[in-house]
Image (cartoon, helix red, strand yellow):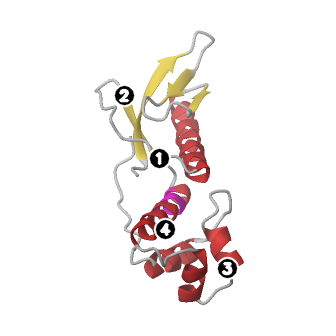
Amino acid sequence: MSTTFYAELIPDSDGGFIVSFPDVPEAITGGRTRAEALDMAADALAVALLGRLEDGASPPALTARDSSLVPVTVPARFAAKIALIEAFNAVSETDPSMNQSELARRLGVDHKEVRRRLDPNHKTKLPALEETLKALGKRIVIKIEDAA
């Protein structure tokens, strides 16, 4: 799942801006200024994507790309959690032996700890996310870009 989606930024008749995402229609927010609206949009996008994962819904396809749309990226603290949940789901689909208990065994932690790490609403520290991804044969790679 991509953690960058394109948003439509519309001036609000009451002042400020409304932000929506054609590919993630449940992510709608706004702000008094363009900068505030885009900051709020990043959080709204994170909540929507984590909500989809929690509901077991398919990740949205990234289809909207238009010069009038603005790219918005999920904050890194949420992107890492999204990546972990997606990696676990992908590995468990291809390897029937992979479940939360097996992951806990590989990590040498209690099953409850794995459940927390895979919970979209639980704040998990980056080292724990990295450790869990490594147990799934994955790693986090960070890319730095110029701010929009």
* Sequence-first tag of 4 and 2: 2
Q: Amino acid at mark 3?
A: His
Tell me where residue 24 appears, x and y as whole percent.
48, 35
Magenta stretch bounds: 79-83
Residue 56 point in image, percent of width and height: 56, 51
Q: Is residue 119 magenta?
A: no
Relative horizontal placement of residue 29, taking residue 141 as reference (left or right): right
Q: Which residue is mark 2?
A: 69
Q: Disc 3 versus disc 4: distance between alpha carbons?
A: 14 Å
User: Of the numbered discs in the image, which one, if any, rests on residue 88?
Assistant: 4
Mark 3 or mark 4: whose residue is earlier in sequence: 4
**As drawn, 87 above or below 56:** below
Q: Which mark is residue 58?
A: 1
Mark 4 element type: helix
The residue most toward the front is 96
Which label's residue is closer to the chain start, 2 or 1? 1
Query: Gap between marks 4 and 1, in whole Å?
Result: 14 Å
Instruction: Identify the mark nearer the N-term, 4 or 1.
Output: 1
Q: How many marks?
A: 4
> Relative to 22, is 78 above or below?
below
Front tag of 3 and 2: 3
Whole-percent x, y for residue 78 in the image = 55, 56
What residue sits 46% from the left and 24% below the top? 9
- The amino acid type of the residue labelled 1 equals Ser
Q: Which mark is residue 17?
A: none
Q: Which residue is mark 3?
A: 111
> Could you give the CA–CA distance between mark 2 and mark 1, rounded to whole angstroms?
23 Å
Badge 4: residue crowd in 10 Å (few <14, some 14–19, many ≥20): many
**Which element carries disc 3, helix, strand or loop?**
helix
